Amino acid sequence: MATDRPTALGPRLSRGRIVGLAVTSVFTAAAGWLTATGLVRAFAADACGAERSCGSVSVVACLAAGIPLWLLCLVAAASTAHGDAPTSEPSASSDRGVLAGCLALGLLGASLANGDPHPWLLAPVLPLALLTAALDRRGARRWRANRLAAARQDRLEREGITVPALITHVATTGATDNDDPELRVTVGFRTADGADRTATTVDTFPVHLPPRPGGGAEVRYHPADPENLRITLATPAASRDGDVVSALERLAALHREGSLDTAEFAAAKALLLTGDSAAPVHPPYPPRDAVVHPGVRPGAD
């Protein structure tokens, strides 16, 4: 989609924002000139000739105007470049990129401090400018990826199909959060066209109520893009109240197609029939054909 692609100047930079950044750039260079001029007049004994006035008032005025103006320009540049994106969305411009750009422009103005050229201040300008471009390019990529992910999620909500699923494997990742284990849960489901698929979600679950093989779940997927899906795990109570016969049929189908080996099929079948909540959680292993979707909580929408 064309609207998902940021331009070279950033995805939300209108003409007014470009003009605003240009004006901010001029003031940033002026802030660098004022700050450096105040420092030169304060510490360089030969900074002022007979025709120049380098009294303490002028030094304080330059510093008092230059430093706050530089900080104000930094805030204004960041606000202008970020646009109107919500705080939850990655910005198309990097805060570090804006900082590097303001430093580059300030040093450019400082190189002419007190009316004399200071070529050594120009040396960092080009590296900082390149760093600004690199950081803003990275920010644009993050913004584009976020927009594309949001568009896929929106298509899933509008055009997706919800089908029942069955937990086929639960594996520990080794990570914990307040003693609650992080688990990799693999589910099997059948799409509307009759194809059997598996998908995996990784999340933290209560230590006393982990998902178990044979438990129920739902998968909402996009028919034109089956990898665009969302997994919702049923609570253990809901799983026990589900259709046991249908779950057994799904287990048998997964066993026939090779998604479950004989031992896993037997364990899941026994768990389904007995409701044994003490069934073991398997150690980590990578499902070969699983699509990983992190951050799915039990019962989440």
Image (cartoon, grey):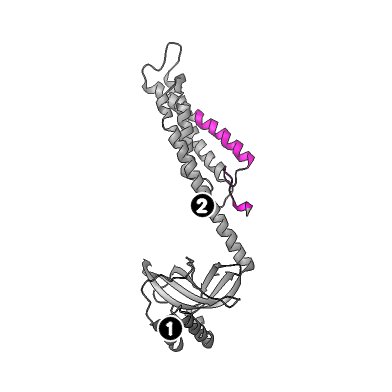
In the image, is residue 97 above or below residue 108?
A: below
The label shown at residue 100 is none
Front one among 191 and 77: 191
Query: Residue 289: x, y in percent?
Result: 47, 70
Check residue 292 for magenta coloring: no
From where the camera sits, is residue 299 visible?
Answer: no
In the image, is residue 201 above or below residue 61?
A: below
Q: Residue at x 37, y 16 (%)?
A: 46
Residue neighbourhood size for the residue with mark 2, other residues' Cα within 10 Å, grouped as few (<14), some (14–19), many (≥20)? some
Q: What range is drawn magenta here?
A: 2-30
Alpha carbon distance from label 2 to label 1 = 42 Å
Residue at disc 2, secondary structure: helix
Q: Nearer the viewer, mark 2 or mark 1?
A: 1
Front one among 287 and 98: 287
In the image, is residue 20 above or below residue 35?
A: below
Q: Quadrant of the C terminus?
A: bottom right
Front one among 27 and 38: 27
Q: Residue at x 51, y 84 (%)?
A: 247
Residue at disc 1, secondary structure: helix
Check residue 20 for magenta coloring: yes
Q: Amino acid at mark 2?
A: Arg
Q: Amino acid at mark 1?
A: Phe
Which residue is most to the front? 257
In the image, is residue 297 above or below residue 36?
A: below
Q: Quadrant of the N terminus?
A: bottom right
Magenta-highlighted stretch: main secondary structure? Answer: helix
Q: Residue at x 63, y 52 (%)?
A: 2
Q: Which residue is mark 2?
A: 142
Q: Residue at x 55, y 43 (%)?
A: 81
The label shown at residue 265 is 1
Residue neighbourhood size for the residue with mark 1, other residues' Cα within 10 Å, grouped as few (<14), some (14–19), many (≥20)? many
